[in-house]
């Protein structure tokens, strides 16, 4: 898993590549949490352009960050989702609670 973060004002953009699974999910959680707390982040954009696979561990990380951002009055967006990962977002119900785009 490759994780790159960029802050634009109060928005954190997290660019991801690789697989989000039980091995990589803790690293993603730590990176996002650190940036959110240190930089007073309100909105979160998860760029899934390079994500080839995601399991339930990834869903858990996304829901956790969603709750954090909601508590701050912000929004979470998932962008550039590949079809194989889009199906996981659909089945999990994440697409009903946040913006997800291809």
Image (spheres, rainbow, N blue to C red):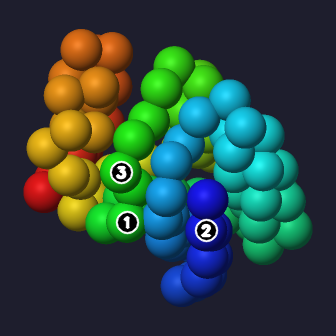
Task: Tell me what residue is drawn at x 42 percent, y 48 percent.
Answer: 76
Report the Cα–Cα distance between label 3 and label 1: 6 Å
- The x and y percentages for residue 9 are 57, 83
> Residue at 27% across / 59% down in the picture?
79
Q: On the image, which quarter does residue 88 sit in?
A: top left
Name the residue rendered at 33%, 15% in the picture.
92
User: What is the crowding at mark 1: few (fewer than 14 residues within 10 Å), some, or many (at least 20)?
Assistant: some
- Bin the neighbour count of mark 3 within 10 Å (Cα to Cα): few under 14, some 14-19, many 20 and up: some
Screen quadrant of the C terminus: bottom left
Residue annotated with mark 2: 2
Side of 37 relative to 79 (left or right)? right
Quarter of the figure that contains the N terminus: bottom right
Rendered position, 96 above or below 82: above
* Precedes in sequence: disc 1 or disc 2: 2
Q: Are marks 3 and 1 in contact (CB under 8 Å)?
A: yes
Q: Which residue is mark 3?
A: 52
Q: Which residue is mark 1?
A: 50
Asked if the residues shown at circle 1 and circle 2 are in contact, with their CB atoms under 8 angstroms apart, the answer is yes
């Amino acid at each position: 898993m490759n994780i790159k973060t960029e802050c634009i004002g109060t928005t954190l953009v997290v660019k991801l590549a690789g697989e989000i699974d039980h091995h990589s999910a803790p690293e993603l959680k730590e990176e996002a949490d650190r940036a959110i707390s240190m930089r007073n982040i309100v909105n979160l954009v998860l760029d899934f352009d390079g994500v080839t696979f995601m399991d339930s561990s990834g869903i858990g990380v996304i829901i956790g960050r969603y709750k954090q951002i909601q508590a701050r009055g912000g929004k979470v967006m998932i962008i550039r989702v590949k079809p194989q990962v889009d199906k996981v977002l659909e089945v999990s119900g994440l697409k009903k609670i946040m913006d997800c785009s291809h």
